[in-house]
Amino acid sequence: MTNLTLKQLRYFEALTRHGRFRLAADACSISQPALSMQIKELEEELGNGLFERSARDVKLTAFGETFAHRVRDILQAVDELGELARAARNPFLARLRIGIIPTVAPYLLPVIINDLNRAYDGIQIDVRETQTARLIQELTQGELDIAIVALPVSEPSLTEMKLFDEDFVLVRRREDEGKPVPERDALREMRLLLLEEGHCFRDQALSFCRIGTAKPREIMEGSSLSTLVQMVGAGIGVTLIPEMAVPVETRSAQVSIARFPSPRPSRTIGMIWRNSTPLAKQLRQIAEVVRRSADSMRGAARLDAS
């Protein structure tokens, strides 16, 4: 068993991740028949089946599960060799692959990109915006260099670096401006608008309101903070948004902003990367640039929210 190739392992990992030949082929930029042939050759070389195939998708066999764990380790090690070469070849990163959660990206990302381009002339920045669970997966698989998420993520294989703490504010109808801010327990009796499941910001809002489960009539969901704020402006309910979102999301909505009394709901935003990356020194420098960018942007946002 000496003829396994890195290409086959990457195709195997893509099929494992996507669960369908067509999606995996698209991700690998090859045809579906070519991917199928490579997987078949890999199975023949191993002398074991890796996937159970059905009309709609594929599932790993027991052997495939064991094989997948080893493949992930191998591909990560190979990617880290590439990173080691990048670190040795350049005093700084020529390319930065950064992931960021949706409740941070629209507000912080433009400032980060501008400041990084000023600080590191010629740097190529590739951005991936998605939810935390997916970012962690892509980071551990070597598809990203860093990710900006809400901390903690509590993944032993990842380094966490705090960037800043941020308060949440209450968004309600413009007619409610100046009224007393409801206690957190009172929010449970209101129609609360939240992001869809999978967003960490949703879980943080539920935790502040001491809501574990709620009846459908008590909670409505939206796909973005922008949608939630517009729904509030239409008189549907109230919502919480992070302070940095205020200038962008409230400028065209008929809403008012109110601050909660202490202890205020808040979150910690930070940067994460693999413990094993040879680029740790450069990524810490990146984090300092991002921290300064965030401080500048949040100062302006705080004025708008006050």
Image (cartoon, grey):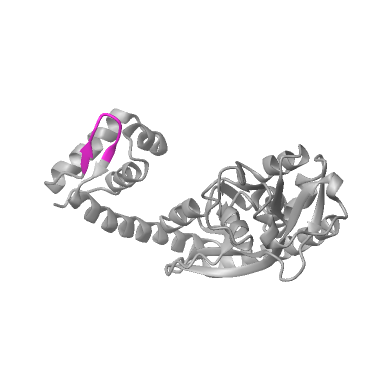
Instruction: Please tell me whether residue 207 belongs to the stretch shown in magenta.
Output: no
For residue 121, side relative to residue 254 (left or right): left
Instruction: Please tell me whether residue 54 belongs to the stretch shown in magenta.
Output: yes
- Residue 255: where, in percent of width, then height? 81, 45
Work out which quarter of the rendered image holds the C terminus and state it.
Answer: bottom right
For residue 2, side relative to residue 141 (left or right): left
Tell me how many marks there are.
0
Q: Residue at x 34, y 55 (%)?
A: 75
Tell me: residue 13, above or below residue 181: above
Depth order, front residue of 77/123: 77
For residue 227, side relative to residue 18 (left or right): right
Q: Which image quadrant is residue 8 in? A: top left
For residue 230, side relative to residue 160 (left or right): right
Q: Residue at x 70, y 42 (%)?
A: 226
Q: Which residue, as the protein is rendered here, is positioned at the far right? A: 178
The residue range painted magenta reads 51-58
Tell me: residue 260, above or below residue 237: below
Depth order, front residue of 258/267: 258
Q: Residue at x 60, y 65 (%)?
A: 270
Q: Which image quadrant is residue 292 in? A: bottom right
- Residue 207: where, in percent of width, then height? 59, 61
Q: Is residue 94 visible?
A: no
- Residue 174: where, in percent of width, then height? 84, 45
- Residue 296: where, in percent of width, then height? 78, 61
Depth order, front residue of 172/79: 172
Q: Is residue 127 visible?
A: yes
Depth order, front residue of 171/160: 171
Q: Residue at x 36, y 61 (%)?
A: 77
Tell me: residue 37, above or below residue 130: above
Q: Which image quadrant is residue 221 in? A: top right
